């Protein structure tokens, strides 16, 4: 039997971000500018101050936003799973993309891993969706075409697959 899936705690992420911001004596505007440095030289749209300040109040936040925040905090996605007190494993550490590159989830790779696990377990997509809170069958099968996926929902997938989220994080120049 699989361990229960834990929810990604957006409120804890917001608190950690605010604590780090205050420790470095940054305004929200200065913090956002630091996070957005990764977007320089890319065609991606930088993150707005209001998005960063208000993410704890949203049902879903684009994974690109949260990944850049995690990068800035130097934290793993798993460190914000409810009840997680374990130190990060090397396999959970997000890749360091370097200048002019940002982090994104590779949703086709997620789909491939889900599909392989589904087939191995003799399941239908509907059964997989039943085990992943907040997902429908269509949402899971559509991952193959590379749509954006948001936090906190995205963190259910690596847990169901029993692997770190970093396995599906890729460095992108756009």
Image (tube, helix red, strand yellow):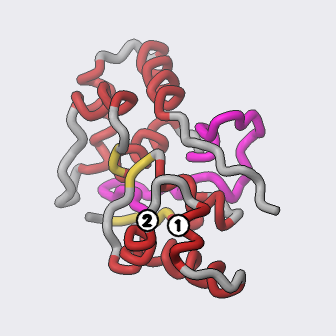
Looking at the picture, does residue 105 appear above or below residue 124?
above
Question: What residue sits 51% from the left and 25% below the top?
Answer: 16
Main secondary structure of the magenta stretch: loop
**Mark 1 or 2 closer to N-term?**
1
Q: Is residue 168 left or right of residue 86?
A: left
Q: Secondary structure at mark 1?
A: helix
Q: Quadrant of the C terminus?
A: bottom left
Q: Residue 109 versus residue 34: which sits nearer the camera?
A: 109
Residue 1 lies within the magenta run: no
Q: Quadrant of the N terminus?
A: bottom right
Question: What residue sits 26% from the left and 34% below the top?
Answer: 51
Q: CA distance from mark 1 to mark 2?
A: 5 Å
Q: Find residue 114 and report its horizontal and vertical position in percent.
A: 57, 75
Provide the residue designation for mark 1: 129
**Number of marks:** 2
Snapshot quadrant of residue 101:
bottom left
Q: Secondary structure at mark 2?
A: loop
Q: Is residue 166 visible?
A: no
- Report the span colored magenta: 77-106
Residue 99 lies within the magenta run: yes
Provide the residue designation for mark 2: 136
Q: Is residue 82 visible?
A: yes
Q: Find residue 72 and report its horizontal and vertical position in percent.
A: 45, 38
Question: What residue sits 22% from the left and 59% below the top?
Answer: 42
Whether the residues at callouts 1 and 2 have beta carbons within 8 Å, the answer is yes
Q: Residue 148 versus residue 19: which sits nearer the camera?
A: 148
Q: Find residue 59 and report its horizontal and vertical position in percent.
A: 36, 39
């Amino acid at each position: 039997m699989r361990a229960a899936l834990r929810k990604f705690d957006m409120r804890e992420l917001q608190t950690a971000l605010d604590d780090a911001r205050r420790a470095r004596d940054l305004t929200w505007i200065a913090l956002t500018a630091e996070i957005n440095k990764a977007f320089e030289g890319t065609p991606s749209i930088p993150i707005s101050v209001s998005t960063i300040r208000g993410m704890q109040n949203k049902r879903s936040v684009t994974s690109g936003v949260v990944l850049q925040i995690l990068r800035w905090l130097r934290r793993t996605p798993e460190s914000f799973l409810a009840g997680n007190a374990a130190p990060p494993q090397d396999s959970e550490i997000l890749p360091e993309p370097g200048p002019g590159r940002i982090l994104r989830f590779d949703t086709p790779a997620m789909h491939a891993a889900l599909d392989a696990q589904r087939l191995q377990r003799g399941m239908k997509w509907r059964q997989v969706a039943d085990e992943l809170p907040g997902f429908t069958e269509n949402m899971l099968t559509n991952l193959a075409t590379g749509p954006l996926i948001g936090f906190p929902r995205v963190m259910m997938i690596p847990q169901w697959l029993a692997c770190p989220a970093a396995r599906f994080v890729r460095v992108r120049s756009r």
